[in-house]
Amino acid sequence: MTQHKVVVVGTGAVGATYAYALLNQSIADEIVLIDMNEDKAKGEAMDLNHALLYADSPSRIKSGSYADCADADIVCITAGASQNKDLTRLDFVEQNTKIFRSIVDQVMASGFDGIFLIASNPVDIMTYVTWKFSGLPKHRVIGSGTILDTARYCYKVGEYFNVSPQSVNGYIVGEHGDSQVAAWSATTIGGKSVLDMIDTDNHDHQKDLEKISVDVRDAAQHVLQTKGATYYGIGMGLAKLTKSILRNENAIFPVSAYMSGEYGLNDMYIGVPSVINRSGTEKVIELKLSGDEQAKLLHSGKVLKDIINTVHL
């Protein structure tokens, strides 16, 4: 039987939650935790092993080193500088670029030939950086993109229309950050456009949709102010994405994917719906956006491109 191995680099709140989700959902046969703080990685591995009795299937869990990446299917990087509530995701890009150069160099030195999954912020930039540093094909470097923003969006839209989030088919696209775009024109419930479900000439309805967009955009700051970090949503999202890769599901996620002309964007990673399978990003799905949404997405791309041009690669 095929054995699936995932290495998690960074055992902070996001990395530990992701590892727990992998175990809880029996997604990986082997999970290796790596952290600069070796005791933290050892402690997390020990704690996870104590849950094995109650897991649905056995998994091998341990702390390790970059040598363990040699035969890994996926290396997920959640490490990096901590986000300060007074800083945007883009403010600390240079610091994380230096951290990533060290991490990616050590992973690749092991002989790694799998798929990179990036969750560290600013995720679109760090995914691009990982692609450049690793030398891997662009489709085998994937960022978490707007999977968390989209989860928040579907939750809020479902709440507004009184349906479950799973019944909402919609996406946040663009940067995982302030310039993200709610693709209202491509959002449906039960196959029906949400814009057809409201009176778009009604000012109150328009304000309601705008408030949802703002609430989704600012959700991270609200969580940071109350509990200090966000990790449940992204941990679950990363696990779902990992499952799609390892089980070759061809599922669609709004990941940070490399742009080669799609949506009028080039040479960057940005959050757009993409088909994910065992080879990585199979293809990008181009939504039919409104003129205003397309313009906002191009602006989001420019925000990221301007940052990329400042990074020392």
Image (cartoon, rainbow, N blue to C red):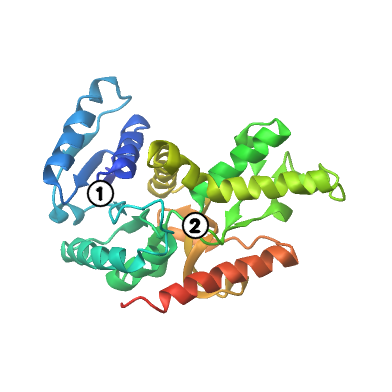
Q: Is residue 41 left or right of residue 74?
A: left
Q: Amino acid at mark 2?
A: His
Circle 2 is placed at which residue position? 176
Say what secondary structure mark 2 lies in: loop
Which badge, 1 or 2, is on the more N-terminal residue? 1
Q: Eyeballing the image, is 34 above or below 189?
A: below
Image x and y of residue 274, in percent: 53, 57
Tell me what residue is drawn at x 46 percent, y 40 percent. 223
Q: For mark 1, what is the residue?
A: 10
In which quadrant of the rendered image does the N terminus lie? Answer: top left
Dividing the picture into quadrants, the one containing residue 225 is top left
- Mark 1 and mark 2 in contact? Answer it, CB < 8 Å: no
| Residue 193 relative to residue 62: left or right | right
Residue 61 or residue 160, whichever sits in front: 160
Q: Which element carries disc 1, helix, strand or loop?
A: loop
Residue at x-position 49% and y-position 42%: 222
x, y percent for residue 161:
72, 35
For residue 32, which quarter of the picture?
Answer: top left
For the residue pair 141 and 172, the one nearer the viewer reads as: 172
**Is the residue marked by circle 1 packed among few (<14), some (14-19), or many (20+) residues within 10 Å?**
many
For the point 56% across and 51% down, which residue is it? 217
Mark 1 vs mark 2, CA separation in Å: 20 Å
Residue type marked 1: Gly
Q: Position of residue 152 (x, y in %)?
A: 56, 42
Q: Can see residue 233?
A: no
Q: Position of residue 96 (x, y in %)?
A: 30, 63
